[in-house]
Image (cartoon, rainbow, N blue to C red):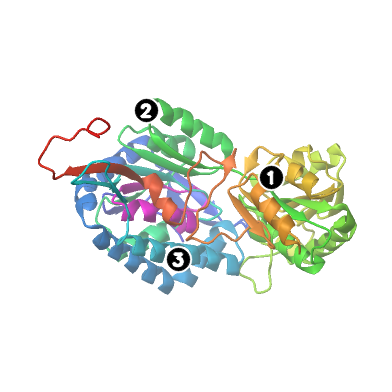
Amino acid sequence: MSYARNLIGGSWEEPGPAVIETVDPATGEKLGKAPKSTAADMARAVAAAKDALPSWSSRPAPRRAETILRLAQLLEQRKETIARIVTREMGKVREEALGDVQEAIDMAYLMAGEGRRLYGVTTPSELPNKLCMTLREPVGVCGLVTPWNFPVAIPSWKSLPALVAGNTVVLKPSEETPGCATAFVEALVEAGIPPGVVNLVHGTGEEAGAALVAHPDVAAVSFTGSGETGRRIQAIAAPMLKRTHLELGGKNGVVVLDDADLDFAVRAILWSAYGTSGQRCTAASRVIAQAGIHDKLVERLAEGAKRLRIGNGWTPGVQVGPLVRPWAVEKVEKYVKIGLDEGAKLVAGGRRPSDPSLKGGFFYEPTVFAGAAPTMRIAQEEIFGPVTAVIRVRDLDEAIRVHNGTPFGLSGAIITRDLASAMKAARAFQTGIVYVHNGTIGAEVHLPFGGIKGTGNGHREAGVTGIDFFTEVKTVYIDYSGALQRAQIDR
């Protein structure tokens, strides 16, 4: 944990004089240092990835997949060790930190299997004695910019599909969680990834990240983070016609109808709103409750939020850990004030905890607003903290309108006993993901992950579709007729 290192061209590099210090968000104590890399460092990493591309892309896909299979096995062996780093660097509670690493394990096993598929299609030709098919080919050097909230899982979501498809990568992880990325890449190296195929460069987004996005030898950029940064990346990449994948924010809603199981609804919302201390793009920051169940739901949610145990994520029984850094707490405080100024009613939380044992950390109480209007800023803007706002609606039709009435479109949920209502919502929600009888979190790696509207630019991560972004499709026509056949003409 003392130092995170860059990996460039197969060589590990210790931090130089310019460093980024990391801290434990549960205590505020310093953990270690990571390189504050420059544009020149990034250029070296891109050059190494470019040099390694011909050899790696020409290796048969099943052989590439064997390396990823070994990675899965190594991550299984190191699961708890890496999870401890996740908790110490970004604060997740133990079971969630273990889950973060498990996602990477699951993704590694999934992509190892894809090495023997990477399917194209074969299709009949309109002409005789002619074969038509498609092949997948790698895009080239891929720049991956990943966030701190899933510091092992998301690097795996991006790197492993890219690698099995034959690309080489340069990973620029969040400066808040360099140790997590280092541990992940160390496992990749031990699994046998060749020098230059995977490069790891730490640093700030303003310098190292911007240099990666702008580099002309980077063929594709995959980014997860804020909408503001995503738009800047798109603006840099667009003039170069660079392929970009943007996974941005969310303002996810749980619709609860009058016939819902109240006990279950409360459990699902508490998990979705306060898991990872609300620091998920899929967090349930809105609860859209039908009038008949609204008052009881608000009362039970407030009670449940107050009972959640706050503390160091590795402490047994703790359910809500710290926010990642002081600026995250300050942002939540700003939005709580906005909510009060807008006229919403605070029914739980709304402050830093008073427990003296938590004073050094970056904690905030699970917070519930009632009486929120759909147009309030707390119901429209991503807070990325342990805050949810309850909105009263008359019926399912109004619930759907409120649910869809934000700039985002990542995850939506409905809790009801009525199948017809559930199916109507599943069709009508303007989101990339829909949960029926659950909260808004819980994606599985073999299914596509992503959103619409302000949440992204149309690509998906995970599942077999996660490979699509990292491959070019080549169409091949093989004419064995012995004659010149002209499509659309010789019919």
Q: Secondary structure at mark 2?
A: helix
Q: Residues within 10 Å of mark 1 (few under 14, many from 20)?
A: many
Q: Residue at x 43, y 52 (%)?
A: 466
Disc with the residue nearer the chain's start (2 vs 3): 3
Identity, as a three-letter code, of the amino acid under mark 1: Ile
Q: Which residues are magenta?
A: 153-180
Q: Position of residue 241 (x, y in %)?
A: 38, 29
Q: Residue at x 83, y 49 (%)?
A: 395
Q: Secondary structure at mark 3?
A: helix
- What label does residue 172 carry, if any? none
Q: Residues within 10 Å of mark 3 (few under 14, many from 20)?
A: many
Identity, as a three-letter code, of the amino acid under mark 2: Met
Say if the magenta span includes residue 452: no
For residue 105, what is the image quadrant? bottom left
Disc with the residue nearer the chain's start (3 vs 1): 3
Disc with the residue nearer the chain's start (1 vs 2): 2
- What label does residue 240 carry, if any? 2
Say if the magenta span includes residue 158: yes
Instruction: Quickly name the residue at label 3.
Output: 106
Query: What whole-number distance in Å separates the C-alpha atoms at marks 3 and 1?
Result: 29 Å
Say if residue 2 shows up in the picture. Answer: yes
Q: Secondary structure at mark 1?
A: loop
Instruction: Quickly name the residue at label 1.
Output: 383
